[in-house]
Structure formats: structure tokens, C-alpha cells
Image: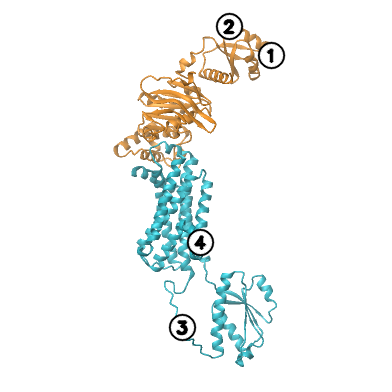
Amino acid sequence: MSATAPAAAVGPAVVRASALTRSFGDFVAVDRVSFEVARGEVFGFLGSNGAGKTTTIRILCGLLAPTSGSASVAGFDVATQSAHIKERIGYMSQRFSLYSDLTVDENLRFWAGAYRLWGRELDARLRWAREVAELERRRRTLVRELPGGYRQRLALACCLLHEPPVVFLDEPTGGVDPEARRRFWDLIDDLSAAGTTVFVTTHSMDEAERCHRVALMHAGRLLALDTPPRLKAGFAAGTVLEVGCALAARALPRLEGLPGVVNAALFGDRLHAVVDDPARRRGIETALAEAGFAPVTVTPIAPSLEDVFIRAIREASREGVA
Amino acid sequence: MIRRMLAVAVKELLQLRRDRRTMLALLAMPVVLLLIYGFALSFDVRDIRLAVVDQSRTRASREVVEAFLKSGYFVRIADLDEPRPLDGLFDRGTAQAALVIPAGFGADVAGRRLTTLQFVLDGSDSQTASTVLGYARQIVVSESSRLYEVKLRPPVVARPLVWYNPDLDSTIFLVPGLVAFILMVSSVIATALAVVREKERGTMESLRATPLVALELLVGKTLPYLLVASVAATGSLTLAWGLFDVPIRGSIVWLALITVLFLAGGLGWGMFLSSLADTQQVAFQLGLLSSMLPTLLLSGFIFPISSMPRALQLISHIVPARYFISALREIVLKGVGPEVWWNDALALVAFGAVVLVLATVQTVRSL
């Protein structure tokens, strides 16, 4: 199975997982996951809630012991050397990692203290952090009074104060407006360019597109791992169709039953279908129109990561049934 | 290690400074509680409501009644001609005691004959009743020798000499215990919320991903509360001395030392509960229950440990207030130094150490 085969990274691996497994009782949250992440890479972990993304991150940060398998971060084993790992990583958890009743500077100083920064180095890092968070003028503002986007940048700055080679970001842009989100990702690109490895989880396809490589995770398993273009190249030209018709939601079961349709899914008020042959296009158009869903338009489109993701999940569940 | 601990302490102090409600509760509550309970709590029995049934109506009978009232222990609430209404007065609790002087009393005294007075007592509160009975006996003995003009001179006299608290004023005995009780409850509650708050807010997860270890976190968090609790303790002890006339005969240095040891134990216990609980609600209730009951019942604050059943005496050894109250009374009332209470101090140190280890182990385990 492709999911358990190690997917090699380009250059030396900073994060390495091998058949990593974590179960809680009977529930397997992370199931034999293997991958490598190179220095300076932006590595995306894509999956729905409960797919095992956060559990994987917590294992890698040394917060949770693996049930079986192994993983290392910056050369240290997660199960036995978590103290060394904690010195060398930044972790921005899903829940807010800042103290809302402290000011910007008080938060920065506290997290700097937790990493034993002091003296000239501390001053330099504080200046850097204020600049990155764009909060030079709001040093004495309570964090709870800051807009969400600024808080996110400050949280990121806090976990980068000690200049860790690896940073883990667990859904860092939840609840932030698109502009702030875009600027946050510019920051991630800068970090990566400076050699910091960024391990980020998301369930947003737009964000996944900005990663160097994306791992698709579903029900604890790694379904696919590659660069976004290569993931999308898994589809033959013309086999991904966008179907516009009346009552799209009700047309979906009909579409799925048509000959040559490998799978179909609802995208907003439209349908996406993956077919075995580009020539199926005409047949779909007439079949749906005859079934009363006119007007029907079928156009070949470039596959998105979401198409890749849906197909991977379908294939995985088919394998599970077989 | 020290630097990270300090970072936590500074952060906690900043948060505490902004949290007006908690700050007020920590500083003002002990003083307010001490004021309320200090006045309410006393074993001294005064102003006992006395119903008088004088059927003799003679000079002698009036003198006996007068003797009761002048003693300062009794107030007359009814003057009756016959004992029948007493039932009602006792049932309603209007009267706590009644003095019944029979019709022949005056004549008996005049004739130098043996006679009797009846003293009726509400025994439902046995502690008060036995005290009142003692007062009444004393009054009657001295009145009878006066009325019969006999000089009672028993061959052996015990001349009592009461040390440390010559008036046997129970307030002076109780207030140090009360201070201990209040400080224990407020210090446990203070820290019981400290760790669990971070769990609820989600900041604990981030703290755990830093090199910060459990011990640094716990000690760092305890320090600011120790500071605030020490201020509250100073306030309480000053109030005890200024308002309740509790003498402070011993050295202030020893007093401060034993108080800080005690506070550290209470704060440590709160930390342990906080690492155990998942919500502030649970932590608060655990803190209240585990600090209030043992300190009230098993510390020697109100009930002497020596008169407890053996099993409870054993349990009382793990109640830190027991050692603090004992040492506090020794320092404050007797003015003695550590040569007397060193074992109490040692027990408090041991309690603090055990609790810190427990809290650390629990925090590490919940990681």
C-alpha cells in the first residue's frame, strides 16, 4: 500500500516518521504513517477533522508517546528525547497559545523566558518578533484587544523567538479573514526561505496549494503524499468534468450511477465527476437532461486538490470494503 | 531552571495583578472572615437568660437572686410567682436557666435550718449547660456561707495560677486557630485554580511544548501567591493582635517563618488539586472541601486532638493546620522559640515537600 511506503524528501530529513501509530483504546488515531520532511520545506498535512493531524503533531512535539512505530525531529527520537526536541521546535496549537490578559510585550517576554533568552539576544529577538507581528506600536495593548489576524502573527512570533529549526502549526489560520490569512502565508514562505522547516495542518485546499508537499490524511492513514502539481497530475487530461445542472444535489446519485463515472461529488451548487474517458462528456449531458435536470452543462476542468482528496478517500474506503 | 521559573512567576504575578476579583478575594476575604468569626466564635458563656421564681419573697431570697444577677453571667428575663410557666419558657428557648426559691426559704434561713434551692437548666447544649452549672454552684456556695455567716475554711486549698491566658479568655485561644483556618482555605483555593485555568484556556498545551518542566511551572506559579498570601496573613495576624487582643509574645521572625511554611503547604496542596482537576469548578470544590473540613475538625482548632478517637488522632497528623496552630499558640501566647515547636515546623516542611512531589508527579503524568 502506497500510504506506508516512506515518501522521501529532497535533502536531509528534519522530521522523519516511520510506521508511526497511536491508538486510544480501540480507536486508531494515527495508523502506520511514514514520511520525511526536508529542511526548509513547507509540509502540509491536509485532512478533515478527526483525520489524525493533531495527534501526529502532538507525537512529533513530544507531547504524546507513539503506540508503535517511531519518529524523530531534528535528529532526536520523539519517544525518548522529547526534552531535546522541545528546545528545538516551535508549536502553535489549535487552541490559542497566548495569554489574553497580558500585553503583547508581556506575552513575548514570558515565552522568551520559557526558552531562557536573555540580555542582548532577548532584546534582538523581541524587536524581531514585534516587527514580524507588526505590533511595534501596540506593545502595551492587551492581547484580548487585538484583532484575530494580529493575534495569529503574534502567536507565531512567540513560538519562533528561540529560532527553532522546525515549527509545527496546527490549523494556524482558523477564524481569520482571507487577507490576514494570505499575509500569514507570506510569513510562512519567508520562514521557509530562511531555512526553517514548517509543518502545517489545514483543511483548506487554498492553503494546501501553497505547500511544497502535501500529505493527505484520512481516518488516521496517509492516503497520498506529493507536491500539489504531481498529486493533480494523477488524473488523465479531460477526465475531471464540472457539471452544472438544475437541482445539483438531487442529480448527484443519478450522475454517480452513469456508465464511466468513477466518482462524483458536490462542489457548492455544481458537481464534479471523474470519468474513465474524456468522451463520456456527451453521454452525461444527455442522460442528466433526460432525467429532468436541464439545463445541463459539462466542461472539462483542471483538477483541484479537492478532487484529488475526494478520489483518494473513495479509493481508500473501497479498499476497506474489499 | 531559575530563569524559567522566574518567567512563570512574573507572568503569573502580572495576570494576578490584572485579576482584581481574585486579588480582592485573596487579600480582603481573610480579614473579613476573621472579623465575622472572631466576634461570633467564643466558648465563654455570658448573659444566660434566667427566669426567677421567687415564692419566698423575703430579704434572703432577694439577696440570692441579686447574687446571681451581679455575677455578670445571668440576666433576668422573667420574674414569676409559680413554676408552671417555666415549661413554656424552656420550650420556646426564651429561658436557658431558672432559679426556683421555695416558699419556706426565708424562714429556713432565719431558723438556720437546712434548705434547698432549685436550679433548672436547659441541657440540650451540654457544653453551655455544664459551664452554667459551674457558675451557679459557685454562687450558691458563696451565698450560703454569707447568709449563714459561717466562715468555711477547708484544710487544703488549691490556689490556681493560670499561665499565658490568666482570664481563660477563649478568644485568645481560638483566634490563632481561626487565622490558620482562614489562611488554609484561602491559600488552597488560590492555587487550586492556577494550573487548571491554563488547561481550560488551552495555554497548557503550548507550555508543554516548551522546555519548561513541571517543577519550574509549579514553583513559578506558587511564588506570586505566596507573596499575596503572606500579605493577607500579616493583615490577619495584625487584626488578631489589635482587635482581639491576642498577645504576640514571641519573635516576629519565628512567627513569619512558621506562617510562610504553613502557607507554602496550603498553596502546594492547591497546586496538586489543580493538576488533578480538569475544570476550575471541580478544582474549587475539591479545594474548599479538602481545606475546610479537616482544618475545622481535625486540627485542634476547636476540638482538642487529645480527646479524639485514636483513628482520628492518626488522621490529624496529615492536617498541616494542626502543626501551625500548635506552633502559633506557642509562639504567640507562650513566646517560646523553635526549641519547643521545631517538630511542628519540620512537619510543615515535610507536608510542603510531599505535596510538591505529588503535584509534580501528577502534572508530569497529565502531560
Q: Which chain is orange?
A: A
Element on which disc 2 rests: loop
Q: Earlier in the sequence, mark 2 or mark 1?
A: 2
Identity of the amino acid at label 1?
A: Gly
Of the residues tagged 2 and 3, which is closer to the observer?
3
Q: Which residue is mark 3?
A: B157
Measured in 3D between alpha carbons, the distance from the residue under mark 3 to the one under mark 1, in whole angstroms, is 119 Å
Write down the residue under mark 2.
A279
- Residue type for callout 3: Val
The Cα atoms of the two marked residues, 2 and 3, are separated by: 125 Å
Q: Which mark is residue B310?
A: 4
Q: Chain of mark 1?
A: A
Kindly indicate whether the residues beneath marks 2 and 3 are on one polypeptide chain. Answer: no
- Residues at circles 2 and 1 in contact by the CB criterion of under 8 Å: no
User: Which chain does the numbered disc 3 sit on?
Assistant: B
Relative image position of residue A199 (x, y in whole percent): 43, 27
Left or right: residue B298 versus residue B258 is right
Q: CA distance from mark 4 to mark 1?
A: 89 Å
